[in-house]
Amino acid sequence: MAYKINNLQEYQTEYAASVENPEAFWAKQADRFQWKKKWDSVLDWNFSEPDVKWFSGGQLNISENCLDRHLKDKGDKVAFFWEPNEPSETGRAITYKQLHTEVCRFSNVLKSLGAKKGERICIYMPMIPEVVVAVLACARIGAIHSVVFAGFSASSLTDRINDAKADLVITSDGSFRGNKTIAIKDIVDDALENSPGVKNVIVYKRTGQPVKMKSSRDLWWNELVEKASAEHKAEAVESEDPLFILYTSGSTGKPKGVVHTTAGYMVYSEYSFSNVFQCEKNSIYWSTADIGWITGHTYIVYGPLLAGVTSVLFEGIPTHPTPSRFWEVVDKYKVTHFYTAPTAIRSLMACGLEHVTPYKLESLKVLGSVGEPINEEAWHWYDDYVGKNNCPIVDTWWQTETGGILISPLAGITKTKPSYATLPLPGIQPVIVDSEGQELEGNDVEGNLCIKFPWPSILRTTYGDHERCRQTYFSTYKNLYFTGDGCRRDEDGYYRILGRVDDVINVSGHRMGTAEVENAINEDEAVIESAVVGYPHDIKGQGIYAFVICEDFDQDHDKIRQSILATVTRIIGPIAKPDKVQIVRGLPKTRSGKIMRRILRKIAEGDVFNLGDISTLLDPGVVEEIKKGALVTL
Ligand code: 6R9
């Protein structure tokens, strides 16, 4: 098992060492892995371009470190227990050796189709073991995977395929999600109408539903794999060769392709996984995330496999067939480490205790939370009814861009505090700055959260647009990585994340840019202009509130709403559907034409008596009208 911190004093010593001599600290961590060629220098960096390089000159393969490295001692250990959507369907147990064989076979399949090092491969799949095989096979041949969440629409998929210039797509015929069957392959077909660069589509048969196979382009997974050899020597890649692209929303325009590279990401994903969760030899770890999000990448695939842990891989949703599904799975596999999102906790909380109390949940040792701030009520419910006041809760703060957890308790070591992510991991140097970029030193301060020194899994660029990366993360405050989150450091030096300070809404732990949702709404025929803001939502954390100007205000508003929801679903996917759509005659704009979102946010929150100064508006009258029609209880 990897090097692990065992107590608070060790944490403090490690932390101090990591700040004093980061290079020596990370070289020691990197030494535990298998290198095809050792690095020449540990770290070269500047945040102004930005240009960050970890373990330069080194060569390695991350899939070899996830799989081959464990074969001698852990070949027969289960890597994944796969639990299907329907409890009546038999699951699968896949050992490290079996996973290795499958990944080797599929690597040969990819090679036989001409896939090469550095090429982009798009993966659009449900939560089945083959998605892990696909990801690791890409890494094994040195190709760059771009996993797209299978809930995104055809048009979102097209954008991501085209931005990454992927020429191969891996998918399935359909997927099971709750009581729905989704025609995944049809969505891919639609997407490919506008992605002429794609030469092949590999289709895994999951549901058995009929699909159209385009000859010479579309190939069945099973047929390709049957013919493939199970021997494959992992390609040597450079430390800084890209490992994957993952698209995420920002405050402006289209989602950006966050790029992570190989060696640093490997070292940090394993280090953070091992230290935050503190798994032991016989632990059964389960993260309920989807592979389409960063949590799925780092803490379903890479972290746990690098650490040689046994995980549960779950295809379904928390409420199918009943809201007991999670607890049933915990008892079935005797899960020891359970990692989920506050939104899931809140939705299960709302379903009632009768779905939890019949379950033993005795195996649980550690609970985790990720994706959004966890409110105290949800924290206590998780602690009382799931952890039975016996399991530390690790509230893990991090981002797609950070690659791994940066601020979190270490399970059983750091004293927890409801709704606090607590302390930075070794190697992480957070700073809180005011709006001018002045560092706020000492405790009991609040401002914007930045990080002042690189850690191994920091993003390296945004795909195809380095300037966007610089602008978004490294230009707001000189020589600092800016997270986009507000933060408080309390009197004990504990960090509490307060949520986004930019135009990003966090809906059920999923990041949505307001601009992105507005662009989708504006595609609707009836719409002239729109403005989107977030508002507090009991289950989702934040909901999406859209103010929309239509061509004809006197049309049936419900009809327009339905049409807008359908348009947003078509363009982005169901996760971006506004919860509230208010049709308005005008939007509050300044004389220079800028929408004053501050006012709309207040209205959406139902706080209409504190709108602040509205005298700079071009037409203050619109505010009164919006207030009258507001879809809130005042
Ligand atoms: C891992 C992930 C990142 C944004 C981040 C922040 C919010 C994530 C959080 C949290 C408070 C936590 N966030 N974890 N806020 N406490 N424990 O979620 O990545 O999808 O990129 O979202 O999510 O606002 O900036 P990503």
Image (cartoon, rainbow, N blue to C red):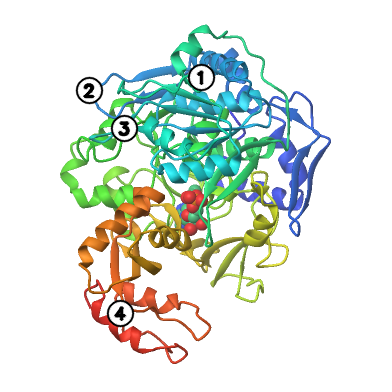
Residue with the mark numbered 2: 88
Query: Mark 3 or 4 closer to N-term?
Result: 3
The secondary element bearing badge 2 is classed as loop
Query: Mark 1 or 4 closer to N-term?
Result: 1
Picture layout, residue 151 above or below residue 231? below
Residue with the mark numbered 1: 216
Q: CA distance from mark 2 to mark 4?
A: 51 Å
Rendered location of residue 551, percent (x, y): 32, 71
Q: CA distance from mark 3 to mark 4?
A: 48 Å
Residue with the mark numbered 4: 626
Residue density around tag 4, few if under 14, some if 14–19, many if 20 or more, within 10 Å: many
Q: CA distance from mark 1 to mark 3?
A: 44 Å
Picture layout, residue 604 above or below residue 207? below
Q: Which mark is residue 561?
A: none
Q: Amino acid at mark 1?
A: Ser
Q: CA distance from mark 2 to mark 3?
A: 16 Å
Residue at the spot x=45%, y=60% of the render?
A: 519
Q: Amino acid at mark 3?
A: Val
Q: Is residue 272 visible?
A: no
The secondary element bearing badge 4 is classed as helix
